[in-house]
Image (cartoon, helix red, strand yellow):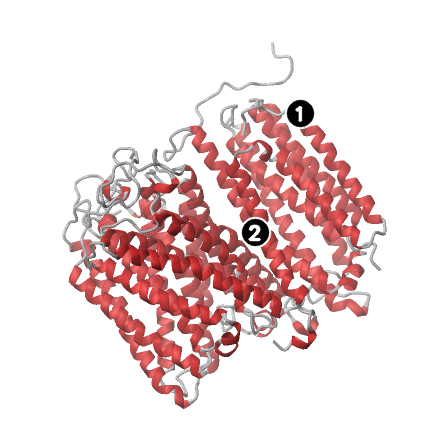
Amino acid sequence: MLADSEMILAPHEPELQHQFDDSAQQLETSTLGMWVFLVTEIMFFGGMFGGYTIYRNMYPEAFASTSHFMNVTIGAINTGVLIFSSFTMVLAVRSAQLGRKKALIAFLILTLILGCVFLSLKYVEYHEKWVDHHIPGPGFHYADPRYIHQAQILFFLYFAMTGMHAIHMIVGAGLLTTLIVMAVRNRFSATWYTPVEMIGLYWHFVDIIWIFLFPLLYLIGHTAK
Amino acid sequence: MSHQIVSVKVYAAVFSALLALTITTVAVSKLELGEFNFIAAMTIAVIKGTLVVMFFMDVRRATSMTKLFVGAGLFWLAILLVFLLSDYLSRGWHPSLRWL
Amino acid sequence: MSTTLPFASTETHPNYLNADYGWKSWLFTTDHKRIALLYLFSITAFFFVGGAFAVCMRLNMLTPEGLFSHDTYNKLFTMHGIIMVFFFLVPSIPATLGNFLVPMMIGARDLAFPRINLLSWYIYIIGGIIALTAVVEGGVDTGWTFYAPFSSTYSNTHVILAALGIFVSGFSSILTGLNFIVTIHKMRAPGMTWSRLPLFIWGHYATALIQVLGTPVIAITMVLLGLERLLHAGLFDPTVGGDPVLFQHLFWFYSHPAVYIMILPGMAVISEIVACFSRKAIFGYGFVAFSSIAIAVLSFLVWGHHLFVAGQSMYASMAFSFLSFLVAVPSAIKVFNWTATMYKGSVSYETPMLYAFGFIGLFTIGGLTGLFLATMAIDVHVTDTYFVIAHFHYVMVGGMVMAYLGGIHFWFPKITGRLYPEGWAKFAALVVFVGFNLTFFPQFILGYQGMPRRYAHYPPEFQALNVMSTAGASILAIGYLIPMIYLTWAWRHGPVSPQNPWNAKGLEWEQSPTPPPTFNFDHQPVVTEPAYNYSGQEQEVDVGG
């Protein structure tokens, strides 16, 4: 009798595609491919980090002024939520490595839920900004007349960076859902779980982006005059 | 890469460290340290990012090729940021030559 | 559902062309060779669309008062640039010859990610359709460089559509690059060490590095431009504190390396052709291989030379100028090494070699004029004149397009199983060479004399050279049309090609039938020779891993 609800799948033939000689080559190839993709993502976000750096440098007072409108509480909670989701993701991969189907599915679902919590809190934040008329565009308004224009630029970058991050989270949520469906259908085993590992890498990367976004957008400038 | 399966303890330790560092960075941000606020926040962020890359993404045990690619990506980001900044930061150096 | 191909495949052995029939077998293929052909046809179509805009431009430049209004002319040169750069030059060799040959040259059955390869073609097509929609809807008038704040605030044309088309097609480029990097790392046949790789592979590897590292930045730049156009937050608007130069920085961070995405594959092709038609290994293989990597790395450090007169700090400009001189060195090394390869080689003058000669000469001229532009003191006078236009057309058209044509001819037998008519091909090469120089050499003079670029009308004293240039363009157009005709003819009716008509070295020629079977080789190749083993050496001491 199995002591707990673990179900250990019998190892089946990993799905070997025709261009590969063996499954080790296939796994190494997939991993390298995912890392190359993540490098492209570093450069993709990098452009926005570049713009942000320039404007922060150019308009330090405006930046200090706008930083008071960043909801540090939500930002901090969201950071914790994402870190937690990376933890559950890594446990999901570990479950796959051990062939534990139920644990795998549970951790994937947990990661997905945490991702949705993040997105919900993000929505709350964005709604706050909308109420404050801080969304760039025709409806934009800023209380301090000295910094109206600069504030709009800075909020534009805020929305561009967090928005792009949120889009990546949404895509990640979709990928997690796919993984859950695949796991339920017994596609994974202790000998083949490559998609779980690859999407795990993606998920961690999106977490890392947030690890940098959080201090840059929410924390620095708080104590500036 | 799944040669040896990492124990839950290690992951839990990294997770706790990440949470602790998050609390730390929020706390430090409330202090008035001038320029050091930025340095402190970025240092903590780099440590957190490194923990995620090394442990959660398993680069710690990955091949040299993987490590090279990760390094290259970060290096290229640095090229973008450094060269970009080099323009803006040096614009004001000699106002008399600004006509160039 | 047709059961025959529009072109006949007479080889009785099963090959990738007769493996399956019908449109589904082409549009849902994962065979890198078929995908290469899908790209070949679409890229050729875009070349002629971009060329049509060029025809209109050159017609306009026949007289000082022109044919078109300023607004229309602005749209013509913009669409010419966008289509030629993003939908022809950037994908050209990598997506066609690269896709076809990379797996074959390393002894693999396919690329690492065949489905992603097909996806990249579809993404390219979608991006292309979006761009063509922008054309049909009335075009864009910002110049292919989309400089802000005109593009972000003041232009009344379909900037967002064009930016979206470029954004989408950028992912095609990224995926191709990703596929090549991983394939070259992981899928080499036994014995195919890095030091035995054909230089074509080194060139495409370097290109792929640039595609992967640079293209995401143009993607985010287009996103920011599009959002700015929608929201008018002021990111690039100087009237509200935004910095238009920031746009230029972000734009050129990609677009300069992009020109090396365009030229490195051309150089890769030239290495193969020169070795084969000199019957000699490329001189200084290691230098040429590493020069490709050096170009890829250095290409990211020079973008500021496009901003010399834009308000960039003088100190940054000096650094960029110096680095731009540096990036010329590896290119020069290649030219020296190709020349040294021919020295005491057994040189023959088949069409691919004619194009290679053309490349080496014209690329050298184009590259040297690049150095003039990298020199700030000269750039101040010739920037935004026809000098710049002549410079980049020498490297891109005199260089890249010639390499592309040379490569198409060189591998035509391998791809189609047929031989093209050598007489017509040589004639066309000559027409292209004459037409090209007549078109673009006068432009160096025009630019030096001060004629600005992107002007629909010009002072009468520039007319003579402009007429010469337009005459050249019409000859060049004929030069491009002739191969279209005989290559299409040859595919159907040309004589059947032997397996290795050029007696070339390389896995694709020596160990694969012509045309190749779907999985490229009848038997897994095992490599024991260095590349370009034209002198028939035994296995060399393996110094690399």
* Residue where numbered disc 1 is placed: B8
Up-down relation of residue C129 to residue A117 (above or below): below
Percent position of residue C264, x then y? 40, 56
Secondary structure state at the residue bearing disc 1: helix
Q: Do the residues labelled 1 and 2 touch (CB within 8 Å)?
A: no
Percent position of residue C378, x then y? 49, 76
Percent position of residue C535, x then y? 23, 45
Q: Quarter-wise, where is residue C224 in the image?
A: bottom right
Q: Which quadrant does the N terminus of chain A fall into? A: top right
Single out the mark in the foreground, 1 or 2. Answer: 2
Q: Quarter-wise, where is residue C58 in the image?
A: bottom left
Picture disc at residue B76: 2
Dot 1 or dot 2, earlier in sequence: 1
Three-letter amino acid code of the residue under disc 2: Trp
Tell whether C281 sits left or right of C366.
left
Which residue is the extreme one toward the top?
A: A1
Chain containing mark 2: B
